[in-house]
Image: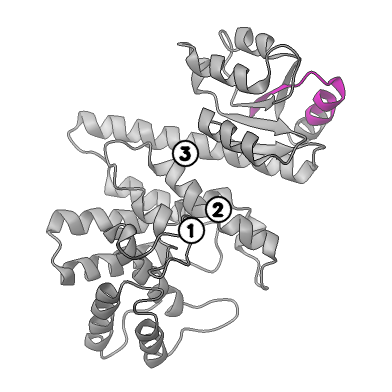
Amino acid sequence: MNWVVVVDDDITNLKVAGTILSRHSMRVTALKSGAALIEYVKTNQPDLILLDIKMPGMDGFETMEKLKAQTSPGADIPVIFLTADDNEESETRGLQLGAMDFIRKPFVPEVLVLRVRHTIELVRLQKDLAAEVERKTRENAALSLHVVQTLAETIEAKDTYTNGHSGRVAEYSRMIAKHYGYSKQQQDEIYMMGLLHDVGKIGVPDAVINKPQRLTEEEFALVKKHPELGDRILKRITEMPKLSIGARWHHERYDGKGYPDGLAGEEILEEARIIAVADAYDAMTSRRSYRNIMPQERVRSEIESGKGTQFDPVFAEIMLQIIDEDTEYKLKEG
């Protein structure tokens, strides 16, 4: 059972949050001040803290600073801020302090439950990966390919329409890298980056990922968060500092019109530019709810037309060479 501590000086907010989360089989502890929280986590280890920003005495930001300054395990408990304001400055400060997310008040029950669950899942995933890395490091191996593959399969299990997508993107990325002259070690590195490029989708609601119809603007905004979520998950794997490159920047465009950072040209790290081509190629050569696999000539035309705009022209040209070598059109979803 997930355990959540809610900190708010408003009793009504405590009761509402407690009722919503309890109905979804979560254990809830209510506290009325930041000082009470600081004392509480010295001897308790909940899965998540929901922390109000505006409180008398010690506000949420000061509480967060004191929480992170502790040497007890409480410093590592993930925090989501609660706020009634739509204030960009406050959100920026909160994220800088290490908050995982923000939830607006008054609570929307479905949003509260989804964000709490996804944050707890994300943190557990980070811990599982970190534990596996630590174990592998003791064996002189940074990270097991098997673990990465298993994680990729776990993410893909959320998506009805992309079976095998991560594995194919990883393989196409390795092929492009090999043509470009990467060493065997570099090819292996980009293969693992490709396997985990969509890991951030664990934080996107299943209903949005699997929606067969066109997404609304709000739903697409949720999907567009997955590169940043993936980066947050993977950047803590310090033994493989490059692992998060593909996750964060595979939707950047060479012309600077991509996301999440709007980078352009060689501002985008090389591995991400390779994975972006591989990802787009697999999207076109896979079945979707609204279409079948595209004909190879059309795929070639799309890659050609994207040179210098969507794609790095060097890696797009390599992909075109690979397409031309694939005379029987085997490089597609089976």
Q: Which residue is mark 2?
A: 225
Residue 284 position, x and y percent, is 44, 79
**Of marks 1 and 3, which one's residue comes earlier in the chain?**
3
Q: Are marks 3 and 2 in contact (CB under 8 Å)?
A: no
Mark 1–mark 2 distance (CA, rounded to whole Å)? 17 Å
**Pointer 3: what residue?**
125
Which is more foreground, mark 3 or mark 2?
2
Give the magenta part as a residue range.
1-18
| Scheme of colours in the image | one colour
Count of numbered circles on the image: 3
Q: Is residue 267 above or below residue 19?
A: below
Q: Secondary structure at mark 2?
A: loop
Q: What type is the residue that disc 3 sits on?
A: Leu
Seen in the picture, residue 266 relative to 98 is either above or below; the reply is below
- Mark 2: which amino acid? Lys
Find residue 246 and report its image quarter.
bottom left
Secondary element type, mark 1: helix
